[in-house]
Amino acid sequence: MSQSHTTLTPIFNNWCYLRYKVDPFKLKEFETYGKMWIPLVEKFGGIHHDYLLPHEGASNIALALFSFPSLADYEVYRTAAADDPACQAAMNDYEATQCFFSYERSFMRPVFE
C-alpha cells in the first residue's frame, strides 16, 4: 500500500518554484550550491523539497522547489537570509563558481486530493 504525498509532507500553500539556467560544465558546483541551501530554507521555517539536476534532455536547466506556510513567512526568510552568515556563504559560493547564469522564481499552490 503506497502513501500519498500529502501524508509524507506537511501541506504549505505557498510553494516557490525556481528554474535555473545552469552552466552544464559546472553541475558539480551547482549541486554543492544547492546542498548549501536545503538546510538554510529549513532553518528559517520552510520545507525544501529538492533540487533537480539535468539528467536527460536539456543539459542546462535545473529546478528547485521549496515551500513556506505563507508568503509572509517567505518574506521573513528572505529578510533573515540577507544577514545570515551561512546564507552569505552560499551566495559567496555562487559568486566564486558562477554555476548558473540566471533563474526564474514563481509561486505556486499545490493541488492535492
Image: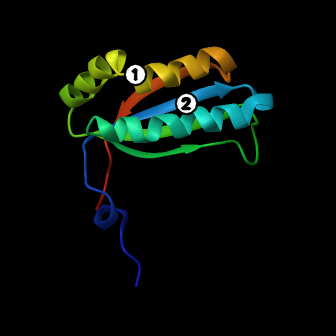
Q: Element type at marker 1?
A: helix
Name the residue located 28 percent from the left edge and 17 percent from the top edge. 79
Name the residue located 41 percent from the left edge and 78 percent from the top edge. 2
For the view shown, which residue lies furthest in the right direction?
25
Against 74, residue 110 (above or below) is below
14 or 23, nearer to the observer: 23
Q: In this view, does 75 lie to the left or right of 97?
A: left
Number of marks present in the image shown:
2
Q: Is residue 29 left or right of residue 47?
A: right
Name the residue located 25 percent from the left edge and 42 percent from the top edge. 13
Instruction: Decide which of tag 1 and tag 2 comes sooner along the chain.
Output: 2
Residue corresponding to mark 2: 19
**Residue 10 in sight in this render:** yes
Q: In which quarter of the image is the N terminus?
A: bottom left
Residue corresponding to mark 1: 85
For the view shown, which residue lies furthest in the front direction?
85
20 or 84, nearer to the observer: 84
Amino acid at pointer 1 = Pro
Q: Quadrant of residue 6?
A: bottom left
Amino acid at pointer 2 = Arg
Against 51, residue 82 (above or below) is above
82 or 15, nearer to the observer: 82
Name the residue located 61 percent from the left edge and 36 percent from the top edge. 32
Q: In which quarter of the image is the C terminus?
A: bottom left
